[in-house]
Amino acid sequence: MKKKFDFSAEMNDTESIKITPKNEYLEEEKRLLDVNAKELANLNDNVHEMSINLVNLLKFLQEYKLTIAQSMQEQAEKFGQSVLDKYLCQIQDKWDETERKIHQADSYVLIPHLVFYILIIILVALSSFFASIIVANTDVLHSTLIWKAAVCCILMAVLGIGITVVIQKFLNKK
């Protein structure tokens, strides 16, 4: 028959391995390696989860970016429309004001200042001639006095027009 081999002696030898500082160091290192392996596995799971979250976030941002771009475009269009409306109102106001001024100017006759003063002088000369004719007619109807009064009035009118033209040119030079 086969004889059974007794391993108890070898087992006792292995149990009797004394704890040495080197063995303690190896045990501590093995324990730290196990802890590191567990932490690394946990970290790997976290990285994988964050990677999935990042992909989902990128998809969300692309959709949201499209929404933002559309809303910004709508806001820009509304702003542009409001600016155009504002300028259109200002142009319309200026148009209305110009039309009003044109209608007012239709009832006026625009003449230069020089012409106005000349007309005033002619009016004064003619009125003085008329007055002198009335005075002359009271004395004698056909006398030299009428002709003297007419010549005086004409000279006064020519002199007044000349003075007005000279003064106007003198003022325009300054």
Image: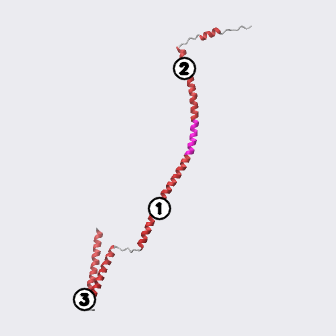
Name the mark on residue 89. Answer: 1
Q: Which residue is found at the position 59% from the left and 36% from the top?
A: 52
Up-down relation of residue 42 to residue 56 (above or below): above
Q: Residue 39 falls in which quadrant of the image?
A: top right
Majority secondary structure of magenta residues = helix
Task: Give the extent of the magenta segment.
Answer: 51-64
Q: Which residue is found at the position 54% from the left and 47% from the top?
A: 68
Location of mark 3 (residue): 145
User: For the residue marked with disc 1, what is the amino acid?
Assistant: Cys
Up-down relation of residue 116 to residue 62 (above or below): below
Q: Which residue is found at the position 45% from the left and 64% from the top?
A: 93
Up-down relation of residue 47 to residue 167 (above or below): above
User: For the residue marked with disc 2, what is the amino acid?
Assistant: Glu
Q: Earlier in the sequence, mark 2 or mark 3?
A: 2
Pick the residue in front: 145 or 114.
145
Measure how far apart labels 1 and 3 are at the Cα level: 70 Å
User: For the residue marked with disc 3, what is the amino acid?
Assistant: Leu
x and y percent of residue 100 in the render?
43, 69
Q: Residues within 10 Å of mark 3 (few under 14, many from 20)?
A: some
x and y percent of residue 55 in the render?
58, 39
The answer to whether residue 129 is magenta is: no
Name the mark on residue 29. Answer: 2
Q: Residues within 10 Å of mark 2 (few under 14, many from 20)?
A: few
